[in-house]
Image (cartoon, rainbow, N blue to C red):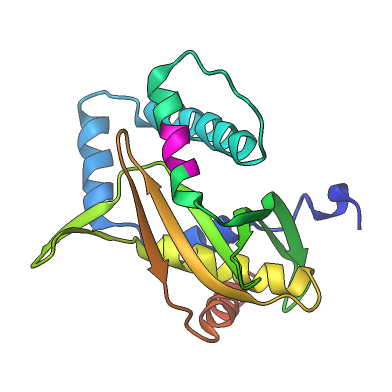
Amino acid sequence: MSLQNIDSYPRVTEIINAVIAKDPKLIDYLIEQERKGIDTRKSFKQAGTKGTKLHDLCKRYLEGEDLKLKNKALENKVSLVGKMKGNLTLINSEYLMHTDTPFNHKGTLDYIFSDENKNLILVDLKTGKPKFKWSPCGWMVIPRPEHCLQLHGYKYLYESFVPGSCISEMRLWYLLNTDIHEVKIPYVPDLWQCLLKLYAWLYL
């Protein structure tokens, strides 16, 4: 199937955003900024552009390209991703997938790695600031629900798109200015299929 034929397919992120309610605090923030005359669309677009650039740099670095970055802040961030990768072997990066089951949809995952036992590991890199919660062991990252759903969607797509494949682990990498945090996301059977049914009921 040509890429032109799948242009109209909804993306994993679009499906999630259409079904999952927005954080009330985010909505209140956007309303307050609009009242102050601040163009939030511009700031979100700028943040998205920076995130896309950083994703591209990390992809090229993990694929073995010598980036020769002059910006030390970017160089440090990219090296953090390399350290987090460790001994994992990169299998796919920025991988576009699609399926027609139960209806047409698509998505582009960040990375598929394999470990020393050939287990496949799905990783989604996040460059926005995550939520933190204090625990007896110190501050811990709380993954956003939409990020967990995104991984489930990519797992479903990958296993549908690549016959015989099986994702063993799902991980979120939250990349900050000077640190990177990994969160392993447990797989919930049929979670993505239930979300797809809800989306189909609402919009199809």
Q: Residue at left 24%, top 32%? A: 33
Q: Quadrant of residue 22?
A: bottom left
On the image, the x and y values in percent for residue 151 come to 52, 65
On the image, the x and y values in percent for residue 157 come to 68, 68
Q: Residue at left 75%, top 63%? A: 98
On the image, the x and y values in percent for residue 143 come to 33, 61
User: Which residue is at the far bottom?
Assistant: 189
On the image, the x and y values in percent for residue 140 come to 21, 60
Q: Quadrant of the C terminus?
A: bottom right
Q: Does the magenta-highlighted stretch encompass residue 125? A: no
Q: Residue at left 43%, top 77%? A: 186
Given residues 86 and 8, the one toward you in this image is 86
Q: Is residue 1 visible?
A: yes
Q: Is residue 202 visible?
A: no
Q: Residue at left 34%, top 25%? A: 39
User: Which residue is at the far left?
Assistant: 136
Q: Main secondary structure of the magenta part?
A: helix
Q: Quadrant of the N terminus?
A: bottom right
Given residues 136 and 160, the one toward you in this image is 136
User: Which residue is at the far right?
Assistant: 1
